Amino acid sequence: MKKRLSPMLAILLTLATMAAFAACGKTPDAPDGPVTSSTAPDVTVNNNPQKPSETTAEASEPVSESDVTEPTTVTTTTGLATTTTKPTTTTKPTTTTTKPTTTKQTTTTAKPTTTTKKPTTTKPPALPDPTTLDKAGIVDWYNGRVNYVRDKKPGFTRMGVQKMDQVSTDKGRLADSIINPIVRQFMPGNPVTTSIARGENNANEFFGPLAKSNVAAGDVLSATARREGGNYVVTLTLGSETNPAKDGSSKYSRVFSIATRQDVINELAGVVSADVNKTTMVYKNGKAVITVNQRGEVVKAYGEFFVTVEARDVKAGPITALLTAEQSTTNDYSSFVY
């Protein structure tokens, strides 16, 4: 029995071997599913029949359709060919992320255009030509220019001189020699220069203390106007006035800054004694002159007047006498700065 089985087993093994070689000669189609590696069973012939060992199949990783895997033939110790599939290399898809391009918006702020308008200068009305005016017209023209100076308050320089031109008494030379130097010391005749800055109150320094010049045509003996170069020169001439007040109610006080007889007595108090009611002051030969440019600005001015003082019963020490004096006042204005 055993002798019959041995040839049969040999034949079966031979057939199996041939079948295996026939299978190796054919290239298998690529499987749709996972590829399985198989190992032929090892069979040992002995007196006791041995069951074929189980075939262990290891599942390989899925193969990407895009990859091509070449089979590798490995010969085992039993002489059977085994097809081993190389592990599939999976290529990770390359993800390219395009960063969004941010375009910065350039904001151009237009600088506001500032248009500075030049201040409009209103030209003063054309200055009338005073040489064409009558007496009343010239006096009004004069008032306008003097008031312009007071309103604008320009700077200027004033040089004034007050002096006693003559002093005498009715008591002869001895009395004259005593009283004369006493009186003259109050009006020595020395020039006094005063500088007025622009913007200062110049009412008391320029032709009288009044806020406005309001000379009337009846206040003056004459009013004349003439041309001198490109300027106009206007001259007012006054007559005489006795004991004028200085509040603007008199002719001379509307043109000049004057002193009253009470001012004179107050000035001499302590040196000589006099009664105001026995004192007379006569203003005379007054003259006011202004030079005006084409813009209507006073550029030069001049004023003068003379005063005769007569005081009765003046006492100076042991002497009581009638005192007579001639006094003059001049004021020259120049260097105007508007």
Image: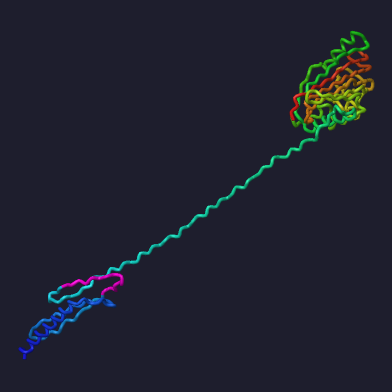
Relative to 67, 273 lies left or right: right
Q: Quadrant of residue 75?
A: bottom left
Q: Position of residue 121 (x, y in %)?
A: 74, 38
Relative to 86, 115 lies left or right: right
Instruction: Give the answer, above or below, for where 10 lies relative to 189.
Output: below
Q: How is the image coloured?
A: rainbow
Q: Which residues are magenta?
A: 60-74
Quadrant where the C terminus sits is: top right
Q: Position of residue 229 (x, y in %)?
A: 78, 23
Residue situated furthest front in the rendering: 26
Residue situated furthest bottom in the rendering: 1
Relative to 79, 128 lies left or right: right
Indicate yes or no whether the magenta region holds residue 70.
yes
On the question of residue 247 being in view, the answer is no
Q: Main secondary structure of the magenta part?
A: loop
Q: Position of residue 10 (x, y in %)?
A: 9, 84
On the question of residue 108 being in view, the answer is yes
Indicate yes or no whether the magenta region holds residue 34.
no
Q: Position of residue 183 (x, y in %)?
A: 86, 16
Instruction: Give the answer, above or below, for where 43 lies relative to 336.
Output: below
Q: Nearer the viewer, residue 155 or 224?
A: 224
Residue situated furthest left in the rendering: 3
